[in-house]
Amino acid sequence: MGESTAKRVVVAGAVIDEGRFLAARRTAPPEFAGRWELPGGKVEPGESAQEALARELREELGVEVEALDRLPGEWQLKADLVLHAWWAPLLKGEPQPLQDHDELRWLTPEQAFDVDWLEQDLPFVEEVVRRLDGTV
């Protein structure tokens, strides 16, 4: 049976710049449209999580990031799919909603919960806020 198949990982990036982090509003699928997330995507076979995140954010936002360290925890999206999030300082570029998103917003810790986050991102957003508050 399919018991031995490894879980696929979806990576999300807490894109950090100048004490703020990036929120992205989804356009699809319909049940997620209009809700906000930390941007990212699926890890492809043969890719590390860091490589996948850098590639996804290049494709979706047109930016270069460095996935520095994984935020604690994971969120089960489906039986075979888990969400991991990474602390990913912005290296280069100005984020644009190129695909999968129609709006981006830089949030300070004080503004972190001004948007309607997808449930799976909330624990990671809370961790990002804790870290940002600690670094100011």
Image (spheres, rainbow, N blue to C red):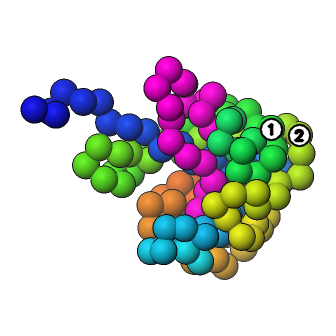
Structural crowding at the residue carrying mark 2, measured as other residues with C-alpha within 10 Å and reported as few (<14), some (14–19) or many (≥20): few
Q: Which residue is mark 2?
A: 92
Q: Residue 41, labelled with which disc?
A: none
Which of the pair 119/131 is nearer the observer?
119
| Of 126 and 92, the residue lying toward us | 92
Q: Position of residue 69 (x, y in %)?
A: 61, 33
For the residues labelled 2 and 1, the Cα–Cα distance comes to: 5 Å
Find out whether residue 129 is within the magenta segment.
no
**In this picture, residue 67 sits left or right of residue 83:** right
Identify the residue shown where x is 67% and y is 65%.
101
Residue at the image position 38 percent from the left and 37 percent from the top: 8
Q: Dot 1 corresponds to which residue?
A: 64
Circle 1: residue type: Glu
Question: Marks 2 and 1: CB-CB under 8 Å?
Answer: yes
Q: Is residue 44 magenta?
A: yes
Q: Is 62 displayed left or right of 25 in the figure?
A: right
Find residue 35 and report its horizontal and vertical position in percent.
Answer: 56, 74
The magenta-colored residue range is 37-53
Judge whether 75 appears above or below 51 on screen.
Answer: below
- Residue sticking out furthest to the left: 1
